[in-house]
Amino acid sequence: NFWALFDANFKRSYSNEMKKIKCQTKILWGKQDKLFPLKYATKFKQNIKNSEIIIVNGNHDWPILKPQEIMKYANTKTI
């Protein structure tokens, strides 16, 4: 059941929901993320007004493995 739900959500477009986001948004993305490649981050950026992408050195699990790293990006300006 997990993989069926995962697959259904993976194929669904969330662009309408993302367009409703009005606040400044930082999109933190792992450079080596094989589950969701960087092309998804660029789609997020296109749909979320006032957003920026911050590419970090890590894979899909980097926030779990290094939660303290997230705070480094709390007040940064990048892309």
Image: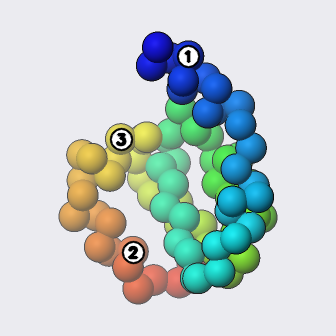
- Residue 14 x/y as whole percent: 70, 50
Give the vertical position of 68 relative to 58 (above or below): below
Residue appearing at x 40%, y 47% in the figure:
58
Give the vertical position of 32 relative to 3 (above or below): below
Q: Nearer the viewer, mark 2 or mark 1?
A: 1
Residue appearing at x 71%, y 31% in the figure:
11
Pointer 1 local density, CA inside 10 Å: few below 14, some 14–19, many at least 20:
few
Would you say residue 51 is visible in this rendering? yes
Q: Nearer the viewer, residue 62 or 14?
A: 14
Q: Which mark is residue 43?
A: none
Q: Which residue is mark 3?
A: 61
Do tag 2 and tag 1 residues touch (Cβ < 8 Å)?
A: no
Q: Which mark is residue 73?
A: 2
What distance separates the C-alpha of mark 2 from that of mark 3?
A: 17 Å
What amino acid is labelled 1 in the image? Answer: Ala
Q: Is residue 29 left or right of residue 63?
A: right
What amino acid is labelled 2 in the image? Answer: Tyr
What distance separates the C-alpha of mark 2 from that of mark 1?
A: 34 Å
Q: Earlier in the sequence, mark 2 or mark 1?
A: 1
Do tag 2 and tag 3 residues touch (Cβ < 8 Å)?
A: no
Q: Earlier in the sequence, mark 3 or mark 1?
A: 1
Q: Which residue is mark 1?
A: 4
